[in-house]
Each structure stands twice: as C-alpha cells, then as structure tokens.
Image (spheres, grey):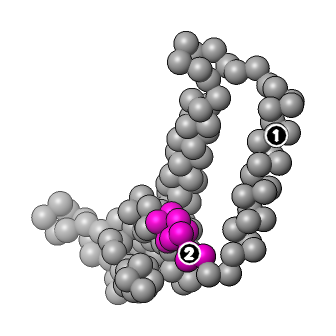
Amino acid sequence: MICSKALGCEFLDKKDLFLHLEELEATVGAFHRELGELKLSVKQLLEANQQLTIENRQLRKVLKKETNPHGERRKADPAGAAQAVTAAAAVLTDEADREDAPAVGEGHDNLARLYYEGFHICNVNYGHLRTEGDCLFCLSFLNK
C-alpha cells in the first residue's frame, strides 16, 4: 500500500512501487479479459434469445392455424391430409415444368425481414445479431 508523509507512512522505494504498478497492471489486464469474455457470452445469449423468440412466434402462428375459432384443435384427417399432399405435389410439378415463370421474390422478402429484425444477411456474418447498427454488406445485398 502506498502511504503519504502526511499520514506518517514511509515512501515505498522505487522497486516496490514498480512491482506494485505491475501487479495493478496484471489485475487490470485480467479484468479486461474477463470483461471481454463476459461480453461475448452476453452477445451469444442475445443471439440465442432472438432466435428462440422468432421460433416461438412461428410456432404460435402454426398453432393458431391448427386451431379453430373456438380454440379447439382440429382432428387429423388422414384422407384429407393425403389429398392436400397430392395437390401440393401437383402444384410443385406444374411450377417446375414452367420455365418462363418469374421468381416470386419470397426469399428476398424473408431476408429483408430477418435484416430488419436485427440479423445479418450478408455472407460475412450471416445469421449473427447486428449489434453495431446497419451493415453495409447487408444493405448492398438488399439493394441488388
């Protein structure tokens, strides 16, 4: 501990003072590393939380679609499900046969939605939470 003459303590010699400064520097360095690790952990937790929030929202939409207006779940109809799968396959086959069909743009809309929800959509940081504002790579991709 460093004392002053006013308190009646003797001054530490230069070697002790230098050793004390090195100890303080090592302690501050350790705190800095620990703070960096903690910051990384918080970032990962925020990303996981955002992903779970989106997944939860999507699951609620699916659940809402599967319930009728009275809040009761629809009973499974195997015959109706088979017909729906057959109809969906026919639609996909028809769309695949058409070569001149323009792209719907649904994928671009989904990427734009992800970007505005706070995620990177660029190839550099795809899927990571945007913590520092807008990303020029993402914006240039959206403008294409």
* Residue at figure coordinates x 42%, y 58% from the top left: 117
- What residue would you read off at disc 1? 83
Tell me where residue 10 appears, x and y as whole percent.
Answer: 27, 71
- Tell me the element at label 1: helix
- Check the image and report above or below for 130 versus 41: below
Residue 103 is marked as 2
Identity, as a three-letter code, of the amino acid under mark 2: Ala
The answer to whether 119 appears left or right of 14 in the picture is: right
Question: Can residue 135 be spotted in the picture?
Answer: yes
Identity, as a three-letter code, of the amino acid under mark 1: Gln
Tell me where residue 82 appears, x and y as whole percent.
Answer: 85, 39
* Residue at figure coordinates x 78%, y 57% from the top left: 90
Residue toward you, 12 or 74? 74
Does label 1 or label 2 sit earlier along the sequence?
Answer: 1
Residue 140 is marked as none
- Check the image and report above or below for 75 versus 32: above
* Residue at figure coordinates x 56%, y 53% from the top left: 51
Residue toward you, 38 or 106? 106
Tell me where residue 77 appears, x and y as whole percent.
Answer: 81, 26
